């Protein structure tokens, strides 16, 4: 690139300059593509790390809640728990009789409520049936 006369440029010097600038441009393009790919991989890895971190935090929270419940169960002193009074033993016949009585009472209430609702419905139906189309 050094020419014998300073200030004089030749066609060969321009061609050499063009060749070197082209090579420099190609290196810039190649390196920028490498950086772009590297940034893409870094972004993907950081997203994966974030997901793993959130999963770990969620697992710790679930474990914390489980441990809290287990600790409460284990910390209870069974000596201080009052004994429950045993309900008197009732026969199956008594249980069925009581259940049937409750069922009959519920049916009577339902039938009584339905009769009142039907009266209101009949009046409403008569109002709309009496109108001409």
Image (cartoon, rainbow, N blue to C red):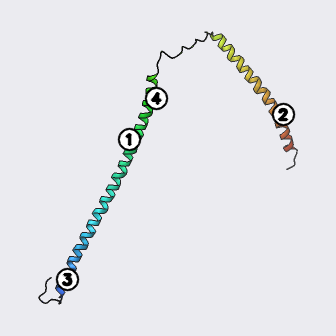
In the image shown, does 75 or 128 lie closer to the viewer? Answer: 75
Q: What distance separates the C-alpha of mark 1 from that of mark 4?
A: 20 Å
Q: Who comes first in sequence, dot 1 or dot 4?
A: 1
Residue placed under numbered mark 3 in the picture: 15
Residue placed under numbered mark 2 in the picture: 119
Q: What distance separates the C-alpha of mark 1 from that of mark 3?
A: 61 Å
Circle nearer the viewer, 1 or 4: 4
In the image shown, does 127 or 40 lie closer to the viewer? Answer: 40
Q: Which mark is residue 12?
A: none
Residue placed under numbered mark 4 in the picture: 69
Residue placed under numbered mark 1 in the picture: 56
Q: Who comes first in sequence, dot 1 or dot 3?
A: 3
Q: What distance separates the C-alpha of mark 2 from that of mark 4?
A: 55 Å
Residue at position x 68%, y 17% in the image: 99
Residue at position x 69%, y 15% in the image: 98
Residue 3 position within the rendered picture, expressed as x and y whole percent measured from the top left? 13, 86
């Amino acid at each position: 690139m050094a020419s014998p006369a300073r200030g004089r440029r030749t066609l060969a010097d321009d061609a050499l300059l063009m060749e070197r600038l082209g090579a420099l441009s190609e290196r810039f393009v190649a390196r920028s593509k490498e950086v772009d790919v590297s940034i893409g991989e870094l972004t993907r890895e950081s997203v994966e790390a974030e997901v793993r971190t959130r999963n770990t935090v969620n697992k710790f929270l679930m474990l914390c809640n489980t441990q809290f419940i287990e600790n409460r169960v284990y910390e209870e002193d069974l000596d201080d728990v009052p004994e429950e009074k045993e309900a008197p033993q009732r026969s199956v016949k008594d249980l069925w009789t009581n259940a049937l009585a409750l069922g009959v009472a519920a049916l009577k209430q339902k039938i009584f409520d339905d009769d009142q609702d039907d009266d209101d419905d009949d009046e409403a139906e008569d109002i709309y049936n009496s109108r001409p189309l």
